[in-house]
Every structure is written in structure tokens, then in C-alpha cells.
Image (cartoon, grey):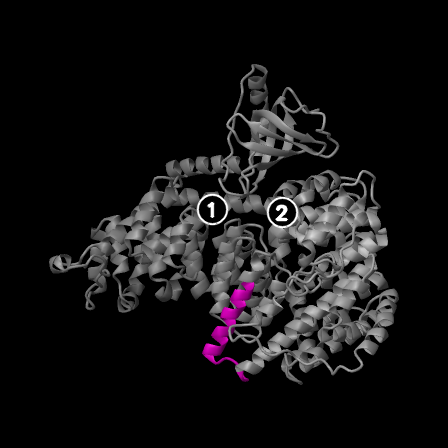
Amino acid sequence: MGTPGEAELIRDLDAPIRTCRLFAIEHLLQYGASQAALEALQRHQAREEDPECAMLLEHAMAAIRSRLAPSTPEAAAAPGATTPASPLLPSDLTPEAFLSRYQATSETARVHLLSQLSPTHLRNFAPYVPALFQAEPNRLLGAALLRTFKTVWPRDHLKPLVPHLRSAYWSMRHAVMDLLVHKAPDLLARDLPRLLGHADPRVRILAVRGLAAVDPAEAERHLIAMFHSPQAEVRFAALQNSIFFPYSVVKPLLLQGLAMETDPEAWQRIALVLENNPDPDLPYRLWELAETSSEEKRPWLIELQKRVCANLQRAHLLEEDYAVYQERLLTWAKQRLARRWVHAVVEQLLDHALPDLDPQLERRWSDPFVQAAVKEALGWSIPETARQWLAAKLPAHLGQQAGSTAATPASPGPASGVDETATPPPIPNEPPLPSPAVGQSSAPMVQAPESTPDELLRQMARWTTADVTEARSTLTAILRQASEPPSALLAMALKTAARLKLPEFVEIARQRVFGKDAPVAAACLEYLGAVDFDWLLPYLGQLVQHEDLRVKTAVVRQLKRVDPEQALSAMKALLSSRDSERQKAALACLIHFEFALVRALLLAYLEQSPAPELFERGLCFFQANPDVGNLFPLYRLERGLSGTAARKARQVREENIRFLTNAGLVKPGAVEIEEATLAQRWAEEQAHSAKRNNACTVERVANPTFWEAFTEYLHDLRFQLAEQGLATWSQRLWNEVRAWAAQHPTIVGTALIGIIAFWVALGWEIETAAPLSPKGGAILSTPIDVTGTVRQTHAQGVMFESQDGRQYVVSAPPGRDFSEVPVGAVVRLRLLPIRMDGSGRIQAQFIAAGAPSPD
């Protein structure tokens, strides 16, 4: 594995996964040489419960102390001499002398002795170390021998190490795997299927590295699966080991990781790799990510792009003048924004979601890039109704622009990156409008009572942040009037309030988001997502069950903010449905994702030959997002389909190539766009599919049969019994059983349910407390029993205050109505905490009620 920095290792001492802590302790043992590292290990020692980690902690602290100790009395007396490096052993030390010294010293001293060996010592002593390893009774020291002599271990002594892959000591397993991956990956062949599906991230990633030596294509699929894992520790292990794979394979995964990760610390880790490996294509990819990122992440991505551009300039990695490169990048960015905006308009036309698009197009038509994008869109795979609508608008505007010249690229931005004035907005539910000059209102004041619904809809479509005063007055009149406004007007009013981020209408949206009027419910989702997301978050799981697809897709857009992986899973489920309406809803949602993230998903859908209308709608994404990465997926469609579908896929591929060459993103005749290159890749994929080891596929290792898992478990136990002896083995087995029980509380809980029921019958109050974060954000989801006083109620939930002063907002399950619970009532509820909002209130889901109950 790559060696992380000391600060990162210290942080990983608190990792919840044991082997992550072992990794940190091992590396501090080998490389730690600071007082901060020693103090961190001492603090961690008090809370470490795993015996193997605890033993390794002792060795690590002793090793660091020896490095911090002055080597001579004179050095100790010298001012400031507190952390000298450990002196190496004499260069003429014989193997016999080393073996004698090793065997005569204590276990702690042996670790220090190994750290004093020079490369020359390692080469000279290597033939003698296998025997020393076999004689070493302490498996942790045995692992240290393997790590120390990894690069020079005799090849004829590698095979005896294979059985230690089943060691009860994780340090030993990892050391053996690391050595075999480095020296003889072929010896891992038999064990690869079980290692690739192992729950431990370190074992799994080492197995992927071993597989890469014999089947690089399948190893790439496993690496992709790890980068997409829901477990942060698995993704981190993949990131740490990305240096062992070709950068051409890793780069797309890093970019996908940036798009999917919600943890800023993970962003920084990925950014470090990207900044140290800049290439001319990377700023383009970062810009694409920024377009569809959250408001929190977008500025950070733009700053990262600037740093990458600066690195490109300093390293002289460009084949052209930097100003020319910047001009091309900015022009491409404006072209991309315009194409995506037009694509969003088309999607809105297909869903009949906008009352009138004329005001929006009139406001953007002065942009020459939008004009060009609309002309191109006439040739896209879009329904004829949308094409006719665009065509009907085009001539009138061309007449207005008769005296204008053709669009010319804007001047290049600052040297550090793309011009900040072109910072990409997200693709919202409605196409974005450029803001007028500061202080300039978009239209004359319109009073709601004196305007017709159609006039109000047009007026709301024109409002910008300069019209907040007018908007607040008019929207209040619409949303708070005594009579029920038309559904379309109500929905547009809430969408406008969301766009302008007006918080005055939260209670109205909370009440209507669960209603049966789908357009209004979807608008409420959009509004609450913009101004009251913490309240909305616990209800997303309930709202996604709504029968209307517009509400489902609105939920997915909100879910993407906190869990992009789950949002993509929802898209996959909708696309795999046999219901064409669900498929349409999924396609409408895909525009809110960075296209590189959904390209594989969309390709798999199109390869199933959906209805022609849906096939063309999916193909339109490749037209609106031209990219080199589109060429092979489109070629796959050409080869895998037939007739009109194959012909259209080829046409779109050729359109992509024309755009890329005209924009200067690839050179005419470049290898990556040649059909021969694509044909060769297709042939290689077919050949790999025919001969790959099915036992090592991602799908196979993730779902072993019961008998396979049981047999492997018995092999592990047999080796570990021989390795440890009966007494130690029995104690460790008991510890494993306890750990398994903690991970499977449902099974254990079934056995204990009778005892718990008996306690409850006797009136015992079993109180449990889930650790709660003092800051806003996700919290540990552990069921808790809470008694408190109801402060607010509505049909979808209650807000009550517990006896210790905490406030809980509890969502009602489907079919339950909490509106009848009286304010002031004392209730006892079993809850599942989900999240703590910025005000300290805990969002929770209802599980069960004690007396009195909110029934």
C-alpha cells in the first residue's frame, strides 16, 4: 500500500474497522518518529479493545521511543537534539551475528532491530530469514519480518507462506498478501475468489492488486466496485491503493468519487491525487462536475480546477500556449452550459412542466452560444413536437439577430482557471435565467389580485433576485389567500419561492408536501429542499413511495444531495421497470446527474432495446454531452443492436467526433476516435468475456454459496487451531462469536425477546441512549426509547421535548395520523434517530409507542 502521512495515520487510529487501525499502527511502528505520534498511540491505548491491536500498540510505542531517544550521551547533551534517527547496524555485520542478536533480544527490541537494517543488510540476510520466520513464535513479529524483507524474500520460500493467508492474526494475513502480490501473485490464484469477496477492505484491495497481475480487466471491475461501495472504509482503501493501477483507469474513478462523496475530508484526499497528476483534460472534467454539484461543493471544485490549471502551466504540460488553452476551455464551458440548458428546456417540454417558455428563451437569446445550441438541438433525437416548438421559435429570433455577426468565443479567463463569471449553475427543475444588472428589476410590478393566472405565471417565470420585494408580496397573496388557487399557479408560486429562497412559506409547504396534488407536492419538495432541507430529510423515504412519478423524481433530486449512490440506485430501479412511465421519469431525472456518472447506466438501458421513443430520448443525452468517453459506448450500441437503432447510434457517434474535433478537444485522426481502435477494444472485450475466470467475477464473489462459505470457514478454523493451540484458539473463537452477535442483533434479539418481554411486563423501564452529535448532520442510527412532552403536532408527525431537554421531530409512518395527539401530552416513543439539524433538533422515524400512544 502507499504510505499515508503521519497525520492521516493518527486519524485512522479511531477507525471503526479493526484492520484500518492495524494498518495505521503498523505504519507508525515502521515510520513513526515524532512525539505527536507517540502521544496519539498512548491516548489510543486506553480505548483499544482488540487484543491484536493492543499488542501491536506496545511494539509501536516502543519503536517510536527508541527513535526519539538520543543515540549517545554527547547527542543527548546537545541543544535541541531530541529526535535523532535510529542508527543503522554496522555494515559488516554477518548473518550469524544478526541471527544471534535477534534471538537474544526481547520482542520489543527485535522490532527496533529490524528497523536498523540497511538495504545491504536485507540482501545479505534474506536467505536466512525464512527459517527465522518459521521459528518465530510471535505471529506479530513474524509479520514484521515479512514486511521488512518483502522486497528480497527468496522466491523458493514463497509457497510455504500461502497457508498463512488463513492466519487468525490480521497483521500476518496482510503481510503475507502484500508480499505475494509483490513477488508471486500467481500463488494467490486458488484463494482469490474468497479474498476478493472478503469483508475486510485491506484483504479485498490486496486481492484486487493480485488479480490485476493475471486479469487486469476483471481487476478494474473490482476496483470500480470498491470505489462505489457504500462503506467509506472500502472506498478509502481503494483510493489508497489507486497508485498501483494505471492512472487512465483510476482517473475516471477519482472523478466519480468526487461527484459521489459528501464528506469534505474525502474530497481533499481525492483532490490530492488529482492535483499531483494534472493533464490537459482534467480541468474539463472538473468543470462538468461543478455543473451538477451542490452549492457547497461547487465553489470548492472551481478552486480545485484553478489549482490544476496552475499546475499544468508550471509543469509545461500543454502543447499550446496557455492563453490559447484557456480560451478553448472557456469557449467549451459556455458551449456546454448552453447545450445542457437547451436539453433541460426540451425535457421540460416533454413533461409539460412549464406554463410558457417564451420569457425564458427571450431572456437568453442574446447569448450566441444558446443560439448555436438550439440550432444543433433541431438535429437531436427529440420528439417531433419539441423539434417543431424550437423550429417555430427560431426564425423570429433569427430575424431579430439579422444584423449580428456569428458567435465568437469569449476572451480567456484568469490564468488560474476558467473565468469565475462563467461558474456553472446547477441544472434545476426549470432552465436557469441570467440575472439582470444589480438593482434592475426584470419586469414592472404586478399585483396578484389584479392579474390573471396566465399573467402571474409569466411574471413569476421572469423574476430574479432583484425582484425579491415584489415576489414576496405577490407570492404571499397567492399562497395565503382564503380561496384555493389553481394547482398550476400554486405549484409555480412554490417553485419561484424555492428559486428565490424565500423562507416565509415553510409551514404551507410542510402541510401540502404529503397531499395528493402531485404537481403541488413536487413543488413543495423543491421548496423545502431549498429552504428547509433538514426537516425534509427524514421524510424522503416515505415520500418516495408516492404513487405519482413527478413526486418520485423530485424525491430523487433531493436524495442526490445527501446520498448520490442511493439516488442512482433509485434511477436503476426505475429504468429496469417494465412500466414505460417509470422509465420516462428516470430519464427525466438523469439530467440532474453528471453524465459521466450515469453513462454506464444509460448504456445498459439502451442495450435492452427500449421503445423507439425512449431509445431516442436516452440517445439525446449523448448528443447533449459530447465527449470522448461517449465513443465506445455508442460503438457498443452499433455492434449490439441492429436496424434503425444501430444507425442512429452511429450517427450520434459521428456527431460527437465532429464536435470534439471542431472544438479542438481532439485532433483529427487521433487514435482514440478511430473506428479501428474502437473495433479492437470491442474484440478484446468479447475475448475477455469468453475466457475470464467466472469464479473471480464481481458478481460471483459477492454471492458465494452457503457451502462454499462454510467450507472456507472450516479451513480457516483448522489452520488457526494449529497456529495458536487449543486454549488461545478457543478464546479467540469466543471473541469472534461475540463480535458476530454484535453485528447480527436481529438474530440474537430473537433469542432474547422473551426475556425483554418479561422485563417490560414487570414494569421495568429499559432506557438506551444513542450517541448524538452536538453538530448538525447524520447521527448514529440506533433505536432509542424516549419519554417527553408534545410541543407541536400535524398529520405527518409530532415535535416533542424529552426529559433531558432534547427536541425530537418524529415523522409518522405511512397510514398513521398524528394530528390528534394533544399538545402538552406526555408520550413514550421508540424512535430511530436519523439526523440532527442546524438548530439541534433530532429528526427521527417512529418505530413504536408506549402509553399514551399517538394513535
Using a 10 Å C-alpha cutoff, classify the residue at mark 2 as few (fewer than 14 neighbours), some (14 to 19) or many (20 or more).
few
Q: Residue at x 85, y 75 (%)?
A: 395
Element at label 1: loop
Residue 311 lies in magenta, yes or no? yes
Residue 272 lies in magenta, yes or no? no
Specify the principal SS of the magenta part: helix
Q: Are marks 1 and 2 in contact (CB under 8 Å)?
A: no
Q: Quadrant of the C terminus?
A: top right
Q: Position of residue 169 (x, y in %)?
A: 41, 47
The image quadrant of residue 606 is bottom right
The disc label shown at residue 168, or none: none
From the viewer's side, name the closer residue of 500 and 41: 500
Q: Position of residue 672 (x, y in %)?
A: 64, 78
Q: Which residues are magenta?
A: 301-321
Q: Residue at x 41, y 53 (%)?
A: 23
Count of numbered badges drawn on the protein? 2
Q: CA distance from mark 1 to mark 2?
A: 25 Å
In the displayed structure image, the side of residue 295 where residue 768 appears, left or right: left
Give the residue pinned by disc 2: 705
The amino acid sitting under disc 1 is Ile
Give the residue pinned by disc 1: 17
The image quadrant of residue 618 is bottom right
Picture layout, residue 244 above or below residue 332: above
Task: Residue 257: tell me if it is visible.
Answer: no
> Mark 1 or mark 2: which comes first in sequence?
1
